[in-house]
Every structure is written in C-alpha cells, then in structure tokens.
Image (cartoon, rainbow, N blue to C red):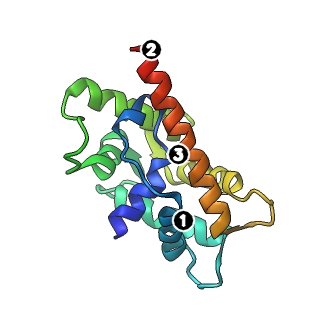
Amino acid sequence: MKKLLLFAGFMMLAAPAQAAFLPSYDPEVTADQVMAVKDYNHDGKIDAAEFEQVASHQFDKIDTNGDGFISGEEMYAKRYAGRSEMNIKTPEVRAQMINSIMKRWDSNKDRQISRDEKLESVRNEFMRIDRDLDHTITRQELVTFWELRLADLKKSQTDSDSKD
C-alpha cells in the first residue's frame, strides 16, 4: 500500500509527455489513500507539518546512497522500478523521464535534488491543494485536486494523440 501511495504522490510530477504512460486512477480513492498516510493525527485534515513530514520520509527512502541528495537515477528507480505496464525500457524514454524529473524538482539545475528543493516543491504543492487557503487540506480538497489532475492528464493525452 505504501508503494501505491508513494506513486499517487509522485503522479503529480508527471510531465505531459508522460501522460500516455500513466494508469487511470480514481480521485476519491486516491484522496482516501493520501489522507490515510498524511493525516498523522487522524483529525480529518492534513496540515503543512504533516504534509512535509511524509515528503521528508520519502526523500530519505529515495536517497538510497544516503548522500543527502536524490539523483535522477534514484528518483527514476523509485518511481518506475518493476512497473511492467509502462513501456519505459528504452534508453531514450528513460532519459526523457529522468530529464522530466530533474526539470520538475531540480530548481538550481545541478542535476541532483536536495532536501530543500524537495520540500520547496512540496510546500508549493500544499498551497495548490489547499484551495480555501486555511493552511489545512481536507479530503474534499484532495478529491478536487486529483479530479483536476486527472482532467489535465486526459487533456494532455488527447493533445498528444492529436499531434501524432
């Protein structure tokens, strides 16, 4: 279940070019899964500290060599290892996906993701989800976020298909 939840969190990172690789998901189920993992005190909402705590824990798990940074290879391995439903076997696709990961997370362009870079991105994500700006995320805000994300992915898929 943790792998599924980690995947749900990382789905937000997917670039439009990757939309064809992403499986469909249910925003209601995803919201429930996120709440189960990130609402540590079980009060029905996620505050910024809870949200960042999960991100920090994920950072530590992804940083397999323990150097305090996540490389594109480490992030790729965590996100896509063993995912047989995705056609990511070619070096070209792998390189494209790693570049997309780094473009999204590596704000200083040094080809590695620091904890600060990860947490800054997580803080921005928190603000995008917290639609009423009350510094907490509710289940309904998560559902809305994932519904919008799913709509964006479908639009991206349609746009990509129409260009082919």
Q: Secondary structure at mark 3?
A: helix
Q: Secondary structure at mark 1?
A: helix
Quadrant of image for the N terminus: bottom left
Residue 130, picture quadrant? bottom right
Which residue is label 3 attached to?
150
Q: Is residue 110 visible?
A: no
CA neighbours of label 1 inside 10 A, class few (<14), some (14 to 19), many (20+): many
2 or 3: tag closer to the N-terminus: 3
Q: Is residue 101 above or below residue 139?
A: above
Q: Is residue 136 left or right of residue 69?
A: right
Kind of residue at badge 3:
Leu
Quarter of the rendering containing residue 51? bottom right
What residue do we see at 45% from left, 51% from top? 10
Q: Position of residue 150 (x, y in %)?
A: 52, 45
Task: Identify the disc placed on residue 163.
Answer: 2
Residue 2 seen from this side: yes
- Amino acid on which disc 1 is placed: Ala
Residue 154 in percent (x, y) is at 49, 37
At 20% across and 51% down in the image, what residue appears? 82
Label 2: state its secondary structure: helix
Q: Earlier in the sequence, mark 1 or mark 2?
A: 1
Indicate the amino acid at tag 2: Lys
| Distance Cα–Cα, label 1 vs label 2 | 32 Å
Q: Count neighbours of disc 2 (C-alpha within 10 A) and say few if under 14, some if 14 to 19, many if 20 or more.
A: few
Other residues around mark 3 within 10 Å, as few (<14) / some (14–19) / many (≥20):
some
**Residue of label 1:** 31
Above-or-below relation of 44 to 12 = below
Q: Residue at x 24, y 35 (%)?
A: 88
Residue that sits furthest to the top in the current view: 164
